[in-house]
Image (tube, rainbow, N blue to C red):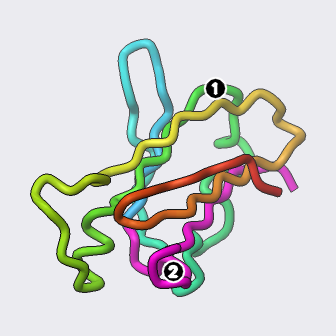
Amino acid sequence: MAGLTTHVLDTMNGCPAAGMGVALYRMTEAGAVLIKRLQLNHDGRADGGPLLAGADFQVGRYRLSFDVAAYFRARGVALPEPPFLDVVPLDFGIADLASHYHVPLLVSPWSCSTYRGS
């Protein structure tokens, strides 16, 4: 099924990043346009299915912004001010509307990694 999904794993604690705030933007010549904000569920995923699907799933440039520092502070992690990672933006493109785009994030307060998942 074509669409856009994400999944965040907390590599510091070895668990899904439940409760992390995420924002999805469409990138335009005029700047970033907010599409939606959400909090990840108990499995580190968005409730309600894909972030983009159907008519909303369009070719273009997008950004997922992950509220990493706020998530770790809420878990009781003492972070410096400013934190090493605060909001982590991931810019990516959607070119093939027949494909599924999965954008996972593996994150700790000091590192992050992503890839195009399946």
Residue wearing tag 1: 60
* Residue 91 in the figure: left or right of residue 60: left
Evaluate if marks 1 and 2 touch, with contact meaning CB atoms under 8 Å apart: no
The residue lying at 42 percent from left, 71 percent from top is 39
| Total numbered labels placed on residues in the image | 2
The amino acid on which the numbered mark 1 sits, given as a three-letter code, is Gly
Please provide the residue range marked out in magenta: 1-20
**Which quadrant of the structure image shows residue 51?**
bottom right
Q: Provide residue 3's location: percent of width, then percent of height.
A: 75, 50
Above or below, 67 against 76 in this view is: above
Q: Provide residue 29's location: percent of width, then percent of height.
A: 44, 13
The amino acid on which the numbered mark 2 sits, given as a three-letter code, is Asn
Check residue 11 for magenta coloring: yes
**Which quadrant of the structure image shows residue 6?**
bottom right
Front residue of 90/100: it is 90
The residue lying at 48 percent from left, 73 percent from top is 40
Q: Provide residue 30's location: percent of width, then percent of height.
A: 37, 15
Earlier sequence position, callout 1 versus callout 2: 2
The residue lying at 32 percent from left, 72 percent from top is 71
Check residue 114 for magenta coloring: no
* Residue 86 in the figure: left or right of residue 8: left
Above or below, 61 against 38 in this view is: above
Q: CA distance from mark 1 to mark 2?
A: 27 Å
* Residue 25 in the figure: left or right of residue 44: left
The residue lying at 58 percent from left, 27 percent from top is 61
**Which quadrant of the structure image shows residue 109?**
bottom left
* Residue 61 in the figure: left or right of residue 65: right
Residue count near mark 1 (Cα–Cα under 10 Å), binned few <14, some 14–19, many ≥20: few
Q: Quadrant of the C terminus?
A: bottom right
Identify the mark at residue 89; answer none if there is no mark: none
Q: Quadrant of the N terminus?
A: bottom right
Residue wearing tag 2: 41
